């Protein structure tokens, strides 16, 4: 099962991804929110950057080392550029990479994203692709 999830993420990871610098609020298991930076986003999910404190709150107690992550979900709230609407989504965390002593990248797959939010995200990605080509 774990291998299948990793293979599925690798396939979805190849979808058109847009580099961003979007501020977001993340919460784990209903705890207080933590500010993170969304680095990339696609139709399937997003990657975000955070500090060591957030990494400790996200990773399961028995597994604090970077690498594949299983069974962890986070709630993320953010706004896309030129939008007044907040997008709220639950994401399944798939991996954690340590970038430096106090910097981590997490890869997540959208688990719950409302249809209206999915449409807004698709519009943003299409516009970003148009801007990239022109």
Image: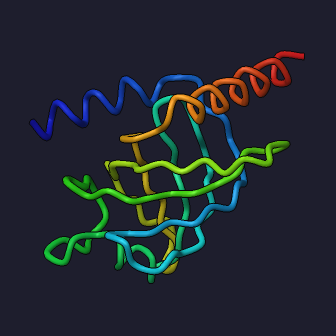
79 relative position to 1: left or right: right
Where residue 123 appears, x then y in whole percent?
Answer: 71, 24
The residue positioned farthest toward the left in the image shown: 1
Where residue 32 appears, x then y in whole percent?
Answer: 46, 80
Q: Residue at x 35, y 77 (%)?
A: 57
Q: Identify the image quadrant of the C terminus.
A: top right
Q: Which coloring applies here?
A: rainbow
Q: Quadrant of residue 60?
A: bottom left
Q: Quadrant of residue 16?
A: top right
22 relative position to 50: left or right: right
Where residue 87 appears, x then y in whole percent?
Answer: 61, 47
102 relative position to 130: left or right: left
Q: Residue at x 72, y 20 (%)?
A: 126
Q: Quadrant of residue 48?
A: bottom right
130 relative position to 120: left or right: right
Where residue 107 appears, x then y in whole percent?
Answer: 42, 49
Q: Identify the image quadrant of the N terminus.
A: top left
Q: Is residue 49 above or below residue 94?
A: below
Say which of 110 and 15 sits in front: 110
Q: Residue at x 36, y 23 (%)?
A: 11
The residue positioned farthest toward the right in the image shown: 134
Q: Residue at x 25, y 36 (%)?
A: 6
Q: How many numbered circles does the render carry?
A: 0
Say which of 46 and 63 sits in front: 46
Say which of 8 and 86 sits in front: 86
Q: Is residue 106 above or below residue 60?
A: above
Q: Is residue 30 above or below residue 111?
A: below
């Amino acid at each position: 099962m774990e291998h299948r999830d990793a293979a599925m993420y690798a396939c979805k990871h190849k979808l058109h991804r847009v580099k961003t610098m979007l501020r977001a609020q993340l919460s784990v298991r209903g705890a207080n929110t933590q500010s993170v930076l969304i680095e990339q986003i696609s139709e399937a999910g997003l990657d975000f950057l955070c500090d060591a404190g957030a990494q400790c709150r996200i990773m399961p107690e028995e597994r604090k080392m970077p690498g594949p992550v299983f069974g962890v979900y986070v709630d993320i709230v953010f706004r896309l550029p030129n939008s007044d609407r907040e997008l709220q989504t639950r994401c399944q965390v798939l991996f954690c990479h340590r970038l430096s002593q106090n910097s981590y990248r997490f890869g997540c797959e959208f688990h719950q994203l409302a249809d209206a939010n999915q449409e807004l995200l698709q519009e943003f990605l299409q516009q970003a692709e148009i801007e990239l080509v022109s």
